[in-house]
Image (tube, grey):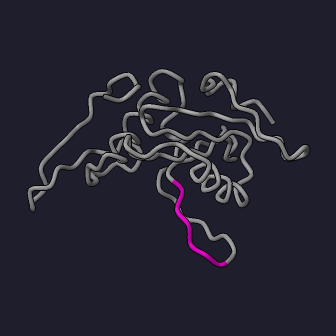
Amino acid sequence: MLNLPEAKLKMRQSANSKLEVFDIIRKKYVSFTPEENVRQQFINYLINIKNFPASLIAVEKGLVINNLKKRFDAVAYNNKGKPIVLIEFKSPEIKINQAVFEQISVYNIKLRVKHLIVSNGIEHYCCKVNFEKGKISFLEDIPFYKELNFIE
C-alpha cells in the first residue's frame, strides 16, 4: 500500500497480455511496473493536491552528463519554462538511501534546480538545494506549486 492518495489510473491489457497504465503526462500507455505505479500515483498527487500544472511536468527526459546519457524520472517547470523541481521515483521495495540521493544529485549537476523530490511511494523526501553554500536542507512537506514557482 502506497503512502499517497489513491488516484484512479486508466489501465489496460496490451496485445501481449501485459498490464499497462495510461501516463497522463506522456499521453500514452506504458508498462505498469511497481516504479511506474509510484510515478503515476505521485504525479497525480502533485497535480490534484499540490496544484502542479500537468502541462509543466515532463517525464523520462534524457540528458548528457560527462558524455554519459542519463534519463531523469520527472521534472516540473515554472511558468517561464525553467526547471524548478527534479523528481526521482523508486519502486516501493527499494529503500531510499544515500545512493538514491547521489543519483538525483548527479542529474542536478546539469539541471541545477533548487528542489529535489525522491519517493518510493511509501517514503517521500523533498529537499532544497543552496548552490551558493553547497548545502541541502530537507523540508517537512512537499511544497505547493505556487510556493515553488516564484522562488528564484
Question: Could you tell me which residue is drawn at 68 percent across and 35 percent down?
Answer: 127
Q: Position of residue 10 (x, y in %)?
A: 23, 37
| Residue 146 painted magenta | no
Q: Is residue 63 left or right of residue 73?
A: right
Q: Main secondary structure of the magenta part?
A: strand
Q: Which span of residues is magenta-colored?
A: 67-72
Q: Is residue 74 left or right of residue 77?
A: left
Q: Position of residue 79 (x, y in %)?
A: 66, 38
Question: Could you tell me which residue is drawn at 61 percent across and 22 percent down?
Answer: 141
Toward the right, the furthest residue is: 132
The residue closer to the viewer here, 31 or 106, is: 106
Q: Is residue 20 left or right of residue 39?
A: left
Q: Position of residue 43 (x, y in %)?
A: 44, 36
The C terminus lies in quadrant: top right
Which quadrant of the figure has residue 41? top left
The residue closer to the viewer here, 85 or 81, is: 85
Q: Position of residue 4 (x, y in %)?
A: 40, 25
Count of marks placed on residues? 0
Q: Is residue 98 left or right of residue 122?
A: right
The residue closer to the viewer here, 148 or 126, is: 126
The N terminus lies in quadrant: top left
Question: Could you tell me which residue is drawn at 43 percent across and 34 percent down?
Answer: 42
